[in-house]
Amino acid sequence: MKVLLIEDDRETAAFITEGLSAQGIEVQHAADGVSGLSCALRGDYHAIVLDRLLPGRDGLSVLKDIRRAGTSTPVLYLTAMDGLDDRVEGLEAGGDDYLVKPFFLAELLARVRALARRTTAVPVQTRLRAADIELDLIKRTVTRGNCEIALLPQEFKLLEYLLRNAGSVVTRAMLLEQVWDIHFDPKTSVVESHMSRLRSKLSRGTDIEYIRTIRGSGYLFVARA
């Protein structure tokens, strides 16, 4: 079994990691909301243990983005926020269970195992495809049909995020956070300039519009050519 632990308190994280590892469970630890979300979207886990109060991004927003991305890995909140409204808010955001600190390791273990039984780990996706564009995460290549498209590292990362959300509108703020790890508006044209170059490279030699600008909302990668 493989579990993602998103917890900023070092002592708590070490205690959980040691306890679960002793039971043969592989634990990957992320110490803040930003890295935790990245791990959740890129890895295959049987369960996620998520703190509510995290640096970078709070646990509630992390879970909302996990669910928005279509990831169905069961999530157990582990938090000191024990109010009824807190529990309801967390569960309605997509959480599967709620355990309040302080806690007993045996109960945490039982709850994680119960969640893991609900599902099997999703195989790691190594290729992303929409329309006739394919991105290989292992080889780090992008192709259109039989033609390889050379992209710079940040353009590759931008395309990866667009493909993961193909058919859905992504906002400029979402792109700044997920592609550039910027959590404020830098008042620059970094998104627009990269988007323009990516559009040009994808559509070179064809009249297909792969990326549409949705005025007032953001960008949409067209799922079908």
Image: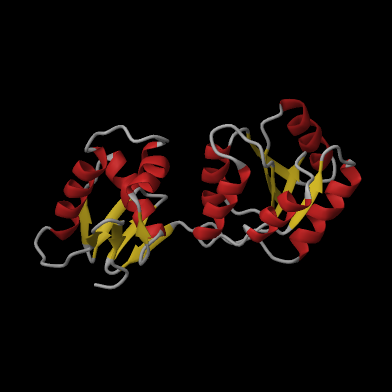
Residue 148 relative to residue 183: left or right: left
Residue 142 relative to residue 53: left or right: left
Foreground residue, 19 or 6? 6
Residue 39 relative to residue 27: left or right: left
Q: Is residue 167 above or below residue 24?
A: below
Foreground residue, 214 or 96? 214
User: Which quarter of the rendering shows the C terminus?
Assistant: bottom left
Residue with the most extreme top position: 11
Q: Is residue 81 above or below residue 118?
A: above
User: Which quarter of the picture shows residue 22?
Assistant: top right
User: Which quarter of the picture shows residue 191?
Assistant: top left
Regarding residue 46, the answer to whether it shows in the image is no
Residue 20 locus on image (x, y percent): 81, 42
Q: Is residue 33 above or below residue 9?
A: below
Regarding residue 224, the answer to whether it shows in the image is yes
Q: How is the image coloured?
A: secondary structure
User: Which quarter of the picture shows residue 129?
Assistant: bottom left
Instruction: Kindly identify the residue that appears in the image at 32 percent across and 61 percent down.
Output: 134
Instruction: Kindly identify the residue that appears in the image at 58 percent across and 41 percent down.
Output: 36
Instruction: Kindly identify the residue that appears in the image at 52 percent across and 53 percent down.
Output: 65
Instruction: Kindly identify the residue that appears in the image at 71 percent across and 42 percent down.
Output: 27
Residue 73 locus on image (x, y percent): 64, 58
Residue 44 locus on image (x, y percent): 60, 54
Count the numbered circles shown: 0
Residue with the most extreme bottom position: 224
Foreground residue, 121 or 158? 158
